Amino acid sequence: MDIELLKRHFAGIGARVKVGDARVTRWSNDAGIDIRADSRGEFFDIKIDAKDPREYRVIDLRPEQRHLLLLSERDKAKFLCGFDERHWFVCAVPGEGVTNVRAAMEALQPAEVRLAVDRRVKRAKNRLRRHNEAFVRQGEWFFIPAPELVVEEAVVRRNEPISRGRGSKPHMCQFAYRTAGELVMVCNQHPSGVPMNTYEKLLQDNPKARNWGWRQMSRNAEVYVRGRVWHPDHKTLILRGWHRVLMNTEHMAPGRSAVTFLD
């Protein structure tokens, strides 16, 4: 891997990158791509496992967007690296035919978002903007207007978190409505949730688990929100009327396990 060339490419979008050896122990391995910070600010931190090395190469560079597309030569996994609102980010990209930044951004849009874009967005330059006729985006979350939705006030949740799990900081929603999905119990020890039968068995096997701060939520439900949506890394959104919530498609990317940064 040409580290100096990699540094020049990241410098082209105004970013720094550091490449080093991964810390590998019996219990942990920090190989992958992370966002860290030092006295000079944030930087991309690439850790390489000597026993299972990845060679990274930039295949598309867009300085005007402050984005680039990174390829792992070993398994052909791709990663979109760039700047979004206030911070640098790295995101694993799904799809075999992705060869440039624009295609990567489109691949990260779920099918429902792409359909809404095709129907509502007339100008090509607006299709990938954070706010257009089809959606509003905050980080990995897309919000599609749902003006036809009518919700009884009694079932509306207040100050509701939405999270992709794995320890990520949740985005908070002033008003939320969930329909269908699987009922699960969530706590810090189980951020992705456990089914009710698993939850009950946990409590039977470990009485101390009752004090873990459990919260009942729906997994894989349709979620709609309105009002304020806030997160420390993003500008607060104000959604007028109900919007359907959809997460980007990073979870479908083959390289997702190499991304260690969580917002």
Image (spheres, rainbow, N blue to C red):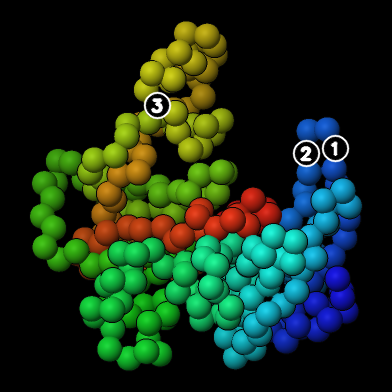
Q: Is residue 231 left or right of residue 262?
A: left
Where residue 124 sits, quadrant-wise, is bottom left
Is the C terminus in the top left, top right, bottom left or bottom right quadrant? Answer: bottom right
Can the viewer see residue 15 in this picture? no
In the image, residue 162 sits, relative to residue 249, either above or below, namely above
Amino acid residing under circle 1: Thr
**Rendered location of residue 55, percent (x, y):** 80, 65
**Residue 138 placed where, x, y %?**
43, 66
Labels 1 and 2 touching (C-beta < 8 A): yes
Q: Where is residue 48 in the image (x, y as percent from the top left)?
A: 83, 57
Res 91 → quadrant: bottom right
Q: What amino acid is labelled 2 in the image?
A: Ser
**Left/right of residue 63 with respect to residue 242 in the rendered view:** right
| Residue pointed to by mark 2 | 28
Q: Which badge, 1 or 3, is on the more N-terminal residue?
A: 1
The amino acid sitting under disc 3 is Pro
Report the front residue among 172 and 253: 253
Could you tell me if the residues under marks 1 and 3 are in contact, i.e. CB atoms within 8 Å?
no
Q: Is mark 1 on a helix, strand or loop?
A: loop
Query: Which mark sits nearer the N-terminus, 3 or 2?
Result: 2
Q: Marks 1 and 3, how far apart in space? A: 32 Å
Crowd band around label 1 with a 10 angstrom C-alpha radius: few (<14), some (14–19), many (20+): few
Label 3 sits on residue: 195
How packed mark 2 is, by other alpha carbons closer than 10 Å (few <14, some 14-19, many 20 or more), is few
- The residue tagged 1 is 25
Q: What element carries label 3?
A: strand
